[in-house]
Amino acid sequence: MRLVLWILRLLLFFLLFGFAVKNDHLVRLHFFFGAEWELPLVFVILVVFAGGALLGVTATFGSLLRQRREIGRLRRQLARTERERTQPPRPDGQQAPEAF
């Protein structure tokens, strides 16, 4: 299995390397106020891809934190329910007050 993974990684590397070699032409990027840069096309593609990946990770980070808070809340609620379940009944017939 490891050999297959390494073969796939090498194949992907050579495909991307071939893509980079084929797209080594210079492109001119025009910015505001007359500023412009000349860069290889593959570099521009790489920077845009990395920026998109970073934006995607940042966008999912908020929902990840929200899910972790919800999991923590549910675990505390489960622990509280388990404690209530294992407590012996009070002699006066009343339930113990809930702790917040």
Image (spheres, rainbow, N blue to C red):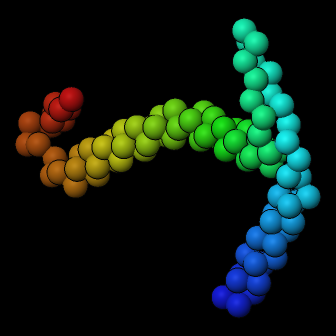
Nearer-the-camera pick, 31 or 14: 31
Image: 59 above or below 82: above
Dividing the image into 4 quarters, which one contains the N terminus? Answer: bottom right
- Residue placed furthest toward the top: 33
Residue at (72%, 18%) from the top-left corner?
35
The reply, left or right, for residue 79 in relation to residue 6 is left
User: Which quarter of the picture shows residue 4?
Assistant: bottom right
User: Which quarter of the picture shows residue 44?
Assistant: top right
- Residue placed furthest toward the left: 91
Residue 30 in the image, given as x and y percentages of width and height? 80, 21
Residue at (15%, 35%) from the top-left corner?
96
Residue 21 in the image, given as x and y percentages of width and height? 86, 61
Residue 79 in the image, given as x and y percentages of width and height? 29, 49
The reply, left or right, for residue 99 in relation to residue 92 is right
Image: 38 above or below 23: above
Nearer-the-camera pick, 100 or 94: 100
Residue at (77%, 84%) from the top-left corner?
7
The reply, left or right, for residue 1 in relation to residue 26 is left
Q: Is residue 49 visible?
A: no
Dividing the image into 4 quarters, which one contains the C terminus? Answer: top left
Q: Is residue 28 visible?
A: yes
